[in-house]
Image (cartoon, helix red, strand yellow):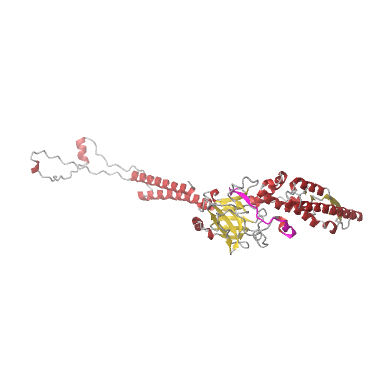
Amino acid sequence: MNEVESAALMLAAMLLLGLLVAFAIWRARRPVTSSPVVPRAPRAPRERRLSQLSRKAPEIADVEIAPSRLARVSGKAPLEPPRDLTIDDPHEPDVPVDVVAKAAIETVATEVEASASEAIGETRAAPLTLHLVPQIPLRDAISTHSWLGGRPRLATGMAWPRIDDQPADFLAQLGCADLPRELWGGRGPRRGALAFFIHRHRPDVRVVHVGEPGPPLAPPYALNDTEGWFSPHGALAGGDLLSFAVRAFPQWPVDLVAADAVDADPRRSDPDDLDTRGYDIADPAFHPFDWGSLTAMAAILESRLDRLVSEPVGGAAPADAIERCIAINREARERAAEIIGIIHDSAVRDPFSPGDAAAVMAALHAIPWARFIGTTNPDGSEAFELVTLPLTTHRADADLWVRDYRMMLFDRAKHAWCADPANLSAPARAHFEPLWQGLATREMASTGGECDGDPVLLALPTSGLMSRRFGDDQTLLVTIASADLAIGDFAKARARLVR
């Protein structure tokens, strides 16, 4: 029983109680009056010839016996008429009984209506909202009925939705059977699934109710539109690194978790910037896991090697230190180029082996490179320190290519992990899963709640985890009128970008 039904029962009970109280008050205050006793007519003597008697009862005059006469007959003092037993304040005027009863009933009704209105108001003020929490780690992607990105499961034979005669981008799918009854005020389907699609260039959506989801359906187009919603995480979204991103939206199963209005919104948490701390990609957590990630690593390193000999080195540093720096970097370039050649040759003839990837990372770690780090002395003068680092080491003030490689690996690893977590090693999963979990928390999608009085079908923020960007880091909000939701007319769903 919900709060509205409880309030209605409470109102009925209190009204009935008020009526009983009013009747009791009226009964107590009603003056007691007695009607004169009419003596019964004497019975006529029985006659044998009843047929000759009149059938009309004789008229008997009323006899009034005075109290004084009764006193003489009984020998007792005459009885006085009973007085009103109700004790009233002599200074207060008499109030009619119906006015008192009506006031009592109105008071009880007002209190019950106020309680019911308060309960209903609280229900309407805080409609249920569900967070779409990505599963990290994955449990069972096959039996999961709700997910973001990837491929939809439409009904068998259903065509891919189109907007303006163009195939639309798939956004998300929600299993209706997993939706709580109170979501959207109890409106909307609770069987099948809702699949969300968007126009590839503007916030125009199509929401499809799928009665019986079929097998996964691949999109009928390649994700190579530079003006679409595709945008990978971080630095991979721009410059020459964009070519290393996997052009797809990863399919991420989600759990539907009720939002707690008391707790702070987890999406406001600050990210943990790994680049502010030092790390080394020779650690097994950062090793390439397939030929795609290994050859992408080689390509990024090759594109950065020229910086070893072309960037200015020491400024006002001593000449011998400058010469030493140039010599170290020239040798590092030659040795790294040799390893890159081995990677390209092996990729076309040998199957991928994690052991070979570990050997490559160990060889790169053994190559030193040098850089001058500028500092400011207490007197304001500038000083330079020659720092020598392994080629696989990242420092916030000394980075050649390691950060770019890690961004590429972050992107490729999430796609491989979503396909099968076993694609990554245990050290890699231990490193990336907390990072993905933190990113998913800050970019969490949701369903439910209201916007301008309309139920919210989907709130999908810009997400580096999902490789999707809406406008200027905005949120896509899909709403529908309550009446349309009640009859299942999802063709009238609307979308807009909000902050």
Residue 352, magenta (yes or no) = no
Which sits in the foreground, 385 or 459? 459
| Image-based side of 85 in relation to 392, left or right | left
Residue 257 is one of the magenta-drawn residues: yes
Quadrant where the C terminus is found in the figure:
bottom right
| Residue farthest toward the right in the current orientation of the protein | 320
- Position in image of residue 390 (x %, y %): 82, 49
Instruction: Identify which residue is drawn at 27% across, 44% down.
Output: 33
Q: Locate residue 148, reporting x and y percent.
A: 62, 53
Q: Is residue 415 rendered to the left or right of residue 379?
A: left
Q: Please, which residue is most extreme toward the top here?
A: 75
| Quarter holding residue 72 | top left
Identity of the residue drawn at 16% across and 41% down: 41
Can residue 398 be seen from the camera position used here? no
Which span is picked out in magenta? 238-262
Whether residue 423 is situated above or below residue 304 in the rendered picture:
above
x%, y% of residue 183? 53, 51
Going by the picture, which residue comes out furthest to the front?
349
Total label count? 0
Front residue of 224/47: it is: 224
